[in-house]
Amino acid sequence: MTQETRKNEIINTAAKLFKEKGYSAVTMRDLATAMGIKAASLYNHITSKQDILKAIIITIAEEFTAGMHAIMNSDASNIEKLKKIVALHINITSNNTNGMASLNNDWMHLEDQLDYYLQLRNEYETNFLSIIQRGISSLEIKANNPEIIMFSMLTTLRSLYLWIPKKEDLSANDLAHSLSEVLIEGINI
Amino acid sequence: MTQETRKNEIINTAAKLFKEKGYSAVTMRDLATAMGIKAASLYNHITSKQDILKAIIITIAEEFTAGMHAIMNSDASNIEKLKKIVALHINITSNNTNGMASLNNDWMHLEDQLDYYLQLRNEYETNFLSIIQRGISSLEIKANNPEIIMFSMLTTLRSLYLWIPKKEDLSANDLAHSLSEVLIEGINI
DNA sequence: TCAACAAACTAACAAACGTTAGTTTGTTAG
DNA sequence: CTAACAAACTAACGTTTGTTAGTTTGTTGA
């Protein structure tokens, strides 16, 4: 199923270019040059520029949705669930740093699929927030403003795509551990 | 000095549009429409699209540089310096949320000024990191990986532009206090 | 009253854009 | 040997892009 190699090569190359310059600044001629072919030849494999963006973003968004559902349905403590969320972001981002850049920066250029994307994102944030709120209720988590906690964690996790490629020496497990430590235990002695 | 009102109106309108769609996706005709004039009329006030981006980004980048220098030269403890950095980001971002979006997302489209921008950014991050390292040496800060601490704090602070406009009920002081709490003291009980 | 000026306009430009149509090439299965 | 097909090609299309040149309009200080 995950063959269609030529199409996937185009999508992966596009994701790399989108990360560097953003969706709007990358032309089909740029993409074709990066593939070593002519722009018109791209259309033997994809139907539009728009569809490339959709393929990149929606795939990842659905991975996050599935991962969050698994975490919600586990019987871990709320702090443990937060640590699982950290690991989820690290895993997905490690496997597709370029795609994560598009998801973060170019989601607004989804046309037909914009509403669907926003729905998935809202769901995700609602679940994230509810874990924090339950953690506060059960005295696992300090009674700070739960939205500030989520904002702080989520923006850090969403920016991992910028940082993971620079730190290839750090394994995913080590990174998950260190990041959970910083995000959850704090930095103060 | 800060008059030139018409030019500044154009720059501020541009920053708002750039936040919504990104620099490359905003056309001079979009900008003109938002100003209620024709595209050609913009050129009575600005010299190019590129110059608008430069005016937005470099101004803010220099504010951060000045703020960081003031903090480095203060005699506060390292933890207190980190709290001052949080306040610095909140102040600058509150005064120019739209511009912060361009700084975060469209810096790579600076052409002539790209090297200068990157130089300012590197300097800033170097200073940030050195505060954390000194804090660890002086036993103010837990001996976690200092780059992870900086990454986590800085990405949260850089994303404030997304979040501050949604939380107008929270004063800058309250936000600075809550965010310092979460970033520095942690969320675990 | 009139010169100066800020700020808008119309018209047009060459270049770059995403995309389509129709064709050629090389490989592979019967 | 040949039919089928994937994957490239050339050529062109209508549109949109940033920008320039030259002109008109309304206000303001001498």
Image: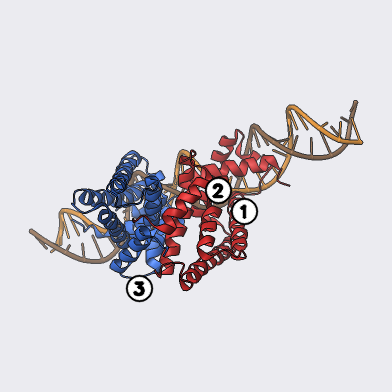
Chain colours: A red, B blue, C orange, D brown
- Contact flag, marks 3 and 1 (Cβ < 8 Å): no
Say which chain tag 3 marks.
B
Residue B39 lies, in percent from the top left, at: 39, 55
Say which chain tag 2 marks.
A
Q: How far apart are marks 2 and 1 (CA)?
A: 9 Å
Residue type marked 2: Gly
- Contact flag, marks 2 and 1 (Cβ < 8 Å): yes
| SS at badge 2 | helix
Residue B149 versus residue A37 in the image, above or below: below
Residue A12 lies, in percent from the top left, at: 59, 43
Q: Is residue B36 left or right of residue A104?
A: left
Please give the residue where the numbered disc 3 appears in the rendered image. Answer: B169
Residue type marked 1: Thr
Which disc, if any, is residue A99? 2
Residue depicted at x 43% and y 67%: A147
Residue type marked 3: Asp
Q: In this view, does A111 lie to the left or right of B2?
A: right
Residue depicted at x 21% and y 57%: B2
